[in-house]
Image: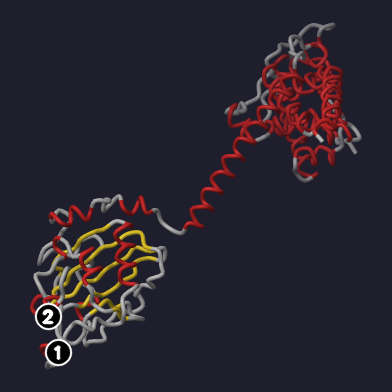
Amino acid sequence: MAAAEAPDTQSSAIDFELWVTEKADALLRFAYVLTGDHQLAEDAVQDALTTACARWGRVSQADDPEAYVKRMVVNAHISWWRRFRRREAPAAEPTRTAAAAPDGTASRADAEAVWALCATLPDKQRAAVVLRFYEELSYAEIAQLLHCAEATARSHVHRALAVLKDTLSKEGAEDA
Amino acid sequence: MPEPDEHELGPQLADAFQSKAHTVQGLRDRGLAREARRRVHKRRQTLIAGSAAVVVAVAIGGVWSAIGGPSPVATSSSDSGSSAERGTSGADSKSAPGEPATTVGCPAQHPILTADGQEAAPSGLGIDLDTQVYGLEACRYGLVDSQQVLLGSATFNATTAQQVVDAIEVLPERNPSLPVFKCTPETARPKEAIVLRFDTATGIREVWVKYDGCASAGFVTGSRTYGLYAAPLKLFMKGGVRPVGGTYLDHLQGW
């Protein structure tokens, strides 16, 4: 029996290795957008890949293994114990850290400002925003990923947008 | 359907995320698969070790249950295997007349103090002599109205306790060599008696030892009475539990 399983196991390991080589970059970029931090991104991806490796038979059979593993990354990031380890403490008042720039660099400055503001959002709100605008998922899919009701997912996104809009408009008025 | 805020900020957010995702540098994308496999291997090893520990613990627990009840070793730790020797020298004996009710094992207030009549027997606490025992506390009580107290006690280990049980179990209902007395109820009541409190899997179980008075003599379990013979008596009548004499003891040799 062991002799019969050995080739399958080896094949599965090679399969997993190839898949990771192909997808690691996308997973890490997604995790970076989700977490906003190099180290947290690498940790979340490594944890997700460890889980995926243990269940590779099932993961590889999924319709979209990449989406499956991204779900694991999200779960790893928003898990309560990981947040406890990070001692998450969102800033009370989001502040714009990038100054307004002259034309030509305005777009890049705005992106920096939005990115900086996103860093001040609570984990679930940030995850909802990333899943909505980076992964372009529907609210139903976001709700499934965040283990909440669709209305709650929608609320996460809208609260985050309200905060961002409010902060950006205040900063815009000050810049003017 | 996207709401106004989404229309306004959505493109900005998407642009910011895409921009950051494509310009980020320094993410370590090598060795992820190897590290994942290493962690899975380690987790499985931990799981197997944990499962093995649980299996061993359950197996030990099962064997322990099969053997039956509390540890003879643990029980004897409070009395020691050499209690017989200590009893002989009187060292195992603890208590004296008037000792407060803090004596471990022997309650100061015991039903035998108020039990009356020749049929007095442990009610509901009598031992089935086929039961395995793990220790013994012998308690000697004065039964005279003015002195109903614990006169002495001694603790014995599982081996001695089992020897006592085995020695009683083979005895006939009465010892025909002992005399039969005719006496008034006042004199029939014994001046003292011993309660043997055995530690068993179901708790403390007793044998009452009657050797004084003139109504009856022997080892009383509540369901049966065994004749008074020296063989069991000499195993536990040591130290403070050894009487000076008794109506029936005076006619018995070798105790």
Q: Position of residue A9 (x, y in %)?
A: 82, 28
Numbered mark located on residue B162 in the image: none
How many residues crowd mark 1 within 10 Å: few (<14), some (14–19), many (20+)? Answer: few
Q: Is residue B60 left or right of residue B214?
A: right
Asked if residue B18 is positioned above or below residue B170 in the image, the reply reads above
Quadrant where the N terminus of chain B is found in the figure: top right
The answer for how far apart the CA atoms under marks 1 and 2 are is 9 Å
Q: Mark 1 — residue?
A: B181
Q: In this rendered view, identify the residue nearer to me: A77 or A117.
A: A77
For the residue carrying disc 2, how many other residues have a C-alpha within 10 Å: few (<14), some (14-19), or many (20+)? some
Subunit ID for the residue under disc 2: B
Residue highlighted by disc 2: B247
> Where on the picture, by quarter, is residue B251?
bottom left
Q: Residue at x 10, y 66 (%)?
A: B98
Query: If the image is split into quadrants, where does the C terminus of chain B sit?
Result: bottom left
Residue A109 position, x and y percent, is: 77, 12
Amino acid type at circle 2 is Thr
In the figure, is residue A13 to the left or right of A93?
Answer: right
Helix, strand or loop status at disc 2? loop
Q: Are marks 1 and 2 in contact (CB under 8 Å)?
A: yes
Mark yes or no: residue A161 visible: no
**Tag 1, which chain?**
B
